[in-house]
Amino acid sequence: MYDVLIIGSGVMGMSIARALNSEAYRIAVIDRDIPGKHASYKAGGMLGAQNEFNSDSALYRLALKSQQYFEPLAHSIAEEVGIDIEYRQSGLLKIAAEAQHSHQVLEQYEFLQQHNPQVRLLTNKDIQQYRNYDISFPTNTAFHIPEDHQINANRYTKALLASLHKRHIERIFSTEVTDIQAGHEGYSVCTNKGKFAAQKVIVAGGAWSHYLLNGQLKAHEPTGVKGEVMLFESRDIQLATTLFFTDGCYIVPKMKQRYLIGATSYFNDYSVNVTAGGMQCLLHQALTYVPALGNATIIKHWSGVRPYTNQEKPVMDEIQQGLFVITGHYRNGILLSPVVGELIALWLKSGVKPEILNDFKLGGCTSGSYY
Ligand SMILES: Cc1cc2nc3c(=O)[nH]c(=O)nc-3n(C[C@H](O)[C@H](O)[C@H](O)COP(=O)(O)OP(=O)(O)OC[C@H]3O[C@@H](n4cnc5c(N)ncnc54)[C@H](O)[C@@H]3O)c2cc1C
């Protein structure tokens, strides 16, 4: 019998397993696929703890905290498994894509600036300077967030996997969980390859988590939001800061003169293909904002499915004794994963729920009252 069985080998499941790491527990992470297929490997890698928020909330505070983990984590995980997760202190420019969006950008700026005086509205002179770095500003309303850095999400997810391996945490792949049955002592996790017994079960199945929970996430309207991205390479462009436009387009400068362009959003779409329409849309936006990308080489494109819940708020709760669900991190799962891993591990080890997680309850009820 496992002490903890985690369903889902994305950044959420693996961060929890890594933080739980203890001689005292028998842990396994189970996944229906082989590594590399889902959102965690496909993300843009932006650590947008400020870019993503325009008001105070528990999620905003968690995001700020989690952002702080990445610099030390980049060093410690490289030492542990020899993978560089490419933490880059690029900062981020938030830019109004249309004149009508200027008001919302200024409001967000005012909120962020109250908490962080380093967030700075761009002057016309700043904008002129950035134009020299190949950016074509659609409006003159933009601000700079110096701390919203980035990593390579694909390398980060691979590093977490290598870390679990090094820590002798069991990983069971190509095994699909079909049901979770409560027993006298813990749970029986049914799969296409037989049953596994566990004292505690964590459902961290990303955009598919609700399929395992018999409608219990229904109030949160869970769904998958497919996103497509493209990767360009260009020796001509000097862009070193992430650009994030209010129409959803972002351009993230990566290592080796590469630029990640994202992202489309299709609600309730779990398909894995990349569409011609999606590519056309991304190309149009990217070339409008950074015309010099017109000469860039397209290296590759891909898609992934973000786990969405209503109000864009994750669910992190114990839905009945010993059965937990950790999902719905939508556009910010990479950013949030270290702090979530640590909080859930703390909860499992101590038996005491960290207070901040009360904001992410199932159905808005206290756990226990759901049944
Ligand atoms: C295009 C794109 C860009 C993004 N950019 C960013 C970004 O810049 N910054 C950021 O912070 N976040 C970003 N995200 C969001 C981030 O990728 C997700 O929030 C995060 O990866 C979710 O992690 P997860 O572990 O919950 O889910 P996943 O990575 O989807 O992992 C879930 C796993 O559960 C497994 N599973 C599901 N059901 C079962 C079952 N029945 N049995 C066994 N296994 C099962 C799946 O096979 C999968 O491996 C982006 C996402 C996309 C798609």
Image (cartoon, rainbow, N blue to C red):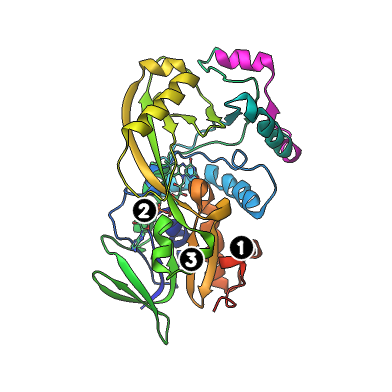
The residue indicated by pointer 2 is: 161
In which quadrant of the rendered view does residue 3 lie?
bottom left
Residue most extreme to the right: 114
Q: Amino acid at mark 3?
A: Val
The answer to which of marks 2 and 3 sits earlier in the sequence is 2
Q: Badge 1 local density, few (<14 within 10 Å), some, or many (20+)?
A: some
Label 1 CB sits under 8 Å from any ligand 1 atom: no
**Disc number for residue 357:** 1
Q: Is residue 128 magenta?
A: yes
Residue 192 x/y as whole percent: 25, 69
What's the magenta region? 113-131
Distance, label 1 to label 2, CA atoms, is: 25 Å
The answer to which of marks 1 and 2 sits earlier in the sequence is 2
Q: Badge 2 local density, few (<14 within 10 Å), some, or many (20+)?
A: many
Q: Secondary structure at mark 1?
A: helix
In which quadrant of the rendered view does residue 97 lie?
top right
Instruction: From the viewer's perspective, tell me whether residue 332 is left or right of residue 260.
Output: right
**Disc number for residue 325:** 3
Instruction: From the viewer's perspective, tell me whether residue 276 is left or right of residue 341.
Output: left
Distance, label 2 to label 3, CA atoms, is: 21 Å
Residue 343 drawn above or below residue 56: below
